[in-house]
Amino acid sequence: MKIAVTSQGNKLDDPVDPRFGRAMRFLVFDTETSDLQVVDNTSNLNTAQGAGIQAAETLSRLGVQAVITGHCGPKAFRVLTAAGIKVYTTDAPTVAAALEKYRSGQLLEARSADVGGHWV
């Protein structure tokens, strides 16, 4: 299973980025192989509109099945759930801590967006 975590860096010890669509990067962790893929998202940082939609489409193309982030807006949430990608929000300080919370069942699947559109 591939899990994407919004990240401010390239490593598991880097902070979770609280934004989904405008996250600096996504760290995509494969639970079966333990492979880690860094997906740059800087092209969406200053996008006027559609950052969340574009980010969700990118993760869908990569075969991601779950996303862990600080917050997720309504348009991104709709695209992610339509693609069958589960969304989890977290206040974990690092990507590694977020993944551990996921593995131990401490994260609940989000039922809706938790911020309005264009949240920065």
Image (cartoon, helix red, strand yellow):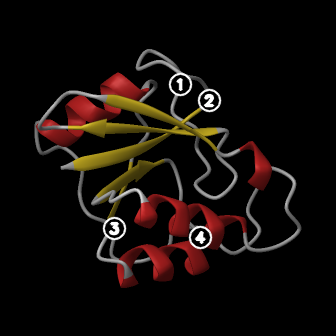
Task: State left or right for residue 108 relative to residue 94.
Answer: left
Kindly check if marks 2 and 1 are in contact, taking CB atoms under 8 A apart as contact: yes
**With respect to residue 20, does 96 lie above or below?**
above
Residue named by callout 2: 8
Depth check, front residue: 89 or 62: 62
Q: Name the residue beneath numbered marker 3.
A: 110
**Few, some or many C-alpha atoms within 10 Å of disc 4 (few <14, some 14-19, many ≥20)?**
many
- Tell me the amino acid under the disc marked 3: Ala
Say which residue appears at 59% left-offset and 61% top-offset: 55
First in sequence: mark 2 vs mark 4: 2
- N-term-proximal mark, 3 vs 2: 2
Number of numbered discs overlaid on the protein picture: 4
Label at residue 73: 4
N-terminal-most mark, 4 or 3: 4
> Dot 1 corresponds to which residue?
15
Q: Gap in Å between the C-alphas at discs 2 and 4?
A: 18 Å
